[in-house]
Image (spheres, rainbow, N blue to C red):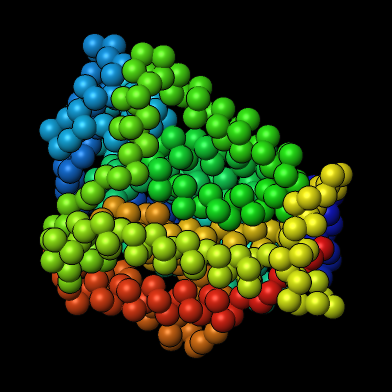
């Protein structure tokens, strides 16, 4: 929406003796920020910091900063080697300098509190884009915005940010920032921010299939390829250059290690399996096949537009789109962009090889929006959110909690498939 249109909405609201929907959005955004600032301050002041990976992060960074080490095989800490791309290293290098080598933990908590507030602010704007605010009605907004409240009330997510300082917090802010940019059809800047998210932690790649589909539809093959290779690939190349020049194989195999096997002890989603079953290649292959199959199912029957006259011709329509020589840039509605990207990520989480407690930050902020899409009572939606929150607050991981998590995930995924309408071409 342009500035002129936005002002017009506010003027109409004032003439009608009430707030325009833009002013209402601003009120919600400010209220959410103020409440979250207070909650973060209370948690930092009254809850004890828990050391898990922060010191390891600082130790890994120290080898890079103090010793000038460029070999990823030699960058490690007490809990293990550095397994994240170069963006992570640069972010935590800055945090290393700001927090006096990691010793000023309270300052680090404040910084992550800011990340928590910024993430929720960005997510509120994503919700606004999805719900059509400021284009939607004020009354409908009131009902829908009630689902923003859970964003500030998760005990586990708050601890991931301000009590444990995990890098998932940094990745989440960047990836949601890219979703907002994509929803605004700002494809180039969105690809830039998205690639930065991937450079902090690879789980952002779960969004990649949805982003690829949207880029192809909006830009065509040639421009989509330029965005993927030139922007996304260029960011990774620039950030990783110091390590690619020195020890390229070590950097690639350690920073982008897809074969990594996690410890079963901390698996929130597969606590009911034995150690041997959890680490088996059969499980990994089965989950990958299910993941890909579900993506294909959603793409063919929910995400790729169909012709109104021939609903079964989606594949033909998509083929013409890809093979078109002169593709006209298409503007994709923000609600469609948001739903495709958040659902794509959720599918990846549902079929993840493992979910640790901090991985909750990968998709928590999308859950209230996703449950509003599915058909059902508000009680069912609230129970789904509550069930997932209970699972991630159950320590240590329990078999019953893992089963409950799969039940909630499966219910949401089925609800998304049944409730998401076939998209029409624009």
Place of residue 1 in the rendered image (x, y in percent of width and height, measured from the top left): 78, 53
Residue at horizontal 72 percent and vertical 44 percent from the top: 221
Q: Is residue 197 left or right of residue 9?
A: left
Q: Is residue 111 left or right of residue 381?
A: left
Place of residue 80 in the rendered image (x, y in percent of width and height, measured from the top left): 17, 35
Seen in the picture, residue 58 relative to 186 is either above or below; the reply is above
Judging depth in this view, the residue of 170 and 397 nearest the camera is: 397
Evaluate whether residue 79 shows in this view: yes
- The image shows a total of numbered marks equal to 0
Place of residue 160 in the rendered image (x, y in percent of width and height, measured from the top left): 29, 51
Q: Is residue 289 left or right of residue 210?
A: left
Residue at horizontal 31 percent and vertical 25 percent from the top: 250
Seen in the picture, residue 321 relative to 273 is either above or below; the reply is above
Seen in the picture, residue 192 relative to 14 is either above or below; the reply is above
Question: Based on the displayed image, in which of its 4 quarters is residue 39 positioned?
Answer: bottom left
Residue at horizontal 51 percent and vertical 80 percent from the top: 415
Place of residue 89 in the rendered image (x, y in percent of width and height, measured from the top left): 35, 27
Residue at horizontal 17 percent and vertical 68 percent from the top: 273
Judging depth in this view, the residue of 363 and 340 nearest the camera is: 340
Evaluate whether residue 107 shows in this view: no
Q: Is residue 277 left or right of residue 377?
A: left
* Quarter of the image that includes the C terminus: bottom right
Judging depth in this view, the residue of 169 and 302 nearest the camera is: 302
Judging depth in this view, the residue of 96 and 275 nearest the camera is: 275
Question: Based on the displayed image, in which of its 4 quarters is residue 94 positioned?
Answer: top left
């Amino acid at each position: 929406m342009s500035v002129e249109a936005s002002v017009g909405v506010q003027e109409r609201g004032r003439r009608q003796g009430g707030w325009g929907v833009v002013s209402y959005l601003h009120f919600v955004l400010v209220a959410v920020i103020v409440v979250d600032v207070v909650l973060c301050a209370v948690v930092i002041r009254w809850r004890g910091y828990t050391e898990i990976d922060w010191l390891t992060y600082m130790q890994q960074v120290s080898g890079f900063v103090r010793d000038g080490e460029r070999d990823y095989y030699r960058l490690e800490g007490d809990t293990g080697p550095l397994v994240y791309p170069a963006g992570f290293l640069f972010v935590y290098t800055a945090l290393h300098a700001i927090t006096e080598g990691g010793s000023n933990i309270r300052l680090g908590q404040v910084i992550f509190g800011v990340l928590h507030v910024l993430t929720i602010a960005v997510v509120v704007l994503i919700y606004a884009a999805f719900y059509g605010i400021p284009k939607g009605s004020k009354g409908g907004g009131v009902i829908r915005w009630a689902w923003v409240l859970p964003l500030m009330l998760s005990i586990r997510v708050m601890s991931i940010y301000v009590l444990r300082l995990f890098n998932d917090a940094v990745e989440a802010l960047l990836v949601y920032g890219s979703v907002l940019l994509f929803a605004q059809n700002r494809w180039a800047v969105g690809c830039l921010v998205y690639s930065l998210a991937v450079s902090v932690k690879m789980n952002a790649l779960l969004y990649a299939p949805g982003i690829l589909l949207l880029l192809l539809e909006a830009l065509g093959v040639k421009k989509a390829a330029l965005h993927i290779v030139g922007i996304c690939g260029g960011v990774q190349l620039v950030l990783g250059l110091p390590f690619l020049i020195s020890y390229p194989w070590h950097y690639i195999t350690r920073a982008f290690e897809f074969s990594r096997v996690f410890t079963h002890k901390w698996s929130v989603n597969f606590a009911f399996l034995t150690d041997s079953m959890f680490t088996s290649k059969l499980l990994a292959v089965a989950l990958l096949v299910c993941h890909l199959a579900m993506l294909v199912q959603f793409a063919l029957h929910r995400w790729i537009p169909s012709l109104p006259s021939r609903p079964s011709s989606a594949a033909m329509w998509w083929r013409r789109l890809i093979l078109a020589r002169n593709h006209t840039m298409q503007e994709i509605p923000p609600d469609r962009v948001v739903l495709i990207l958040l659902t794509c990520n959720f599918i990846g989480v549902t079929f993840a090889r493992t979910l640790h407690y901090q991985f909750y930050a990968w998709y928590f902020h999308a859950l209230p929006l996703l449950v509003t899409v599915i058909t059902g009572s508000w009680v069912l939606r609230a129970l789904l959110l509550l069930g997932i929150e209970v699972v991630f607050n159950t320590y240590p991981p329990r078999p019953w909690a893992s089963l409950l998590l799969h039940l909630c995930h499966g219910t949401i995924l089925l609800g998304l498939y049944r409730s998401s309408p076939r998209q029409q071409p624009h």
